[in-house]
Amino acid sequence: MINRIVVNINQHITCRSSQKGVALLIVLWVLTILLVIVFSFSFMTRTEMLSTASFRGGLEREFIAEGAMERAIMELFYRNVYKNQTIELEGREVWQVDGTPYTGQLGNGTYTVSIIDESGKVDINAASDILLKNLLLNIGISEEDADTIVDSMMDWKDSDDLHRLHGAENDYYMSLQNPYKAKNSRFDSLEELLLVKGVTADILYGSKERKGIKDFLTVYTKKNRININAAPKEVLMAIPGMTPELADSIISSRQTKETTGGTNVRGVLGENYSLMSRYITTGGSNVYAIDAVGHKENEKGAYAIRATVVLAPTTSPDAQPYKFLYYKKPVTITQ
């Protein structure tokens, strides 16, 4: 009898111990699940906070870049009024339109903005094949690829179906996996070059190794000459007879006073003037490319805008003072 009582007591103790163990395991599992929920919620909250801060920072950089764009347009109007002034007051200097970068403060951010007169670029609808090929060679395109691209560009815009030695017409484009016909008309945009044989996205837009040809081409001037007062060095080097030393002299001379008039041009170019004269001009246009980049103080990252703007002629007082021909944001700008 006593043995049975002892056995029952042991069984009861064992049962209660087992129940306590199960309860302990349940409690541990519940705590684990709660901890996972807490950590997940904490992670999600932190992610949302960082995302919100990033969005806010990006928005602020965008507004700074837009403010820089408006500043650049204002400077263009100021330039048109005062570009021929003989005395420049400190802080009221006329901005250059040759790609010179200008920086400024806007709120708690900074901006960098540059302006290029489109006449300082190579117009793909009017320029000679010599200028186009030299430009391609100078930015690192092989001679074989340059010949293909230039001849194909000429074939794309001419009105016939006869292709040049390295060019392409309908027979080539219609043989592609996604066929199309050559335009046989002028280019309406630089992006249209991607349809031309030999032109790739890396060549047009650039890569880490080199700038794209898009930075040096235009469709807006309808001129076959280069404005040496606005052309970047890469474009200056495309002019037959140009040397790096001459290009540097031109850039240096226009930092103080623009090279206006034949006499000054001859003075800078010397004996090379006769060779270059058919490819160059000192006259500008009323169409400008603007790059505006916004930065936040003590923060990484930037927001860039690229636009092409045309100023209204002074003979049209009732017209809009300017209008955008091209406006893209955000963009990647290779410095």
Image: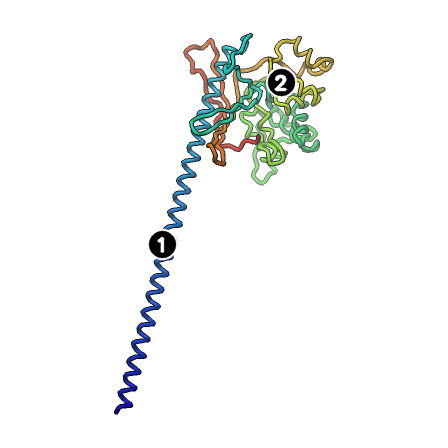
Could you say where residue 46 lies in the image, as x and y percent from the top left? 40, 46
Which picture quadrant has residue 139? top right
For the image shown, how many numbered marks are present on the structure? 2
Which residue type carries mark 1?
A: Val
Colouring rule applied to residues: rainbow
**Residue 202 visible:** yes
Residue at 60% across, 14% down: 256
Q: Position of residue 203 (x, y in %)?
A: 61, 33
Task: Report the front residue among 247 and 121.
Answer: 247
Few, some or many residues within 10 Å of mark 2 (<14, 14–19, 20+): many
- Picture residue at 39% right of the left edge, 48% below the top: 44
Label at residue 38: 1
Dot 1 and dot 2 residues touching (CB under 8 Å): no
Say whether residue 51 is left or right of residue 148: left
Q: Nearer the viewer, mark 1 or mark 2?
A: 1
Q: Residue under label 2, please give it.
A: 226
Image: 59 above or below 101: below
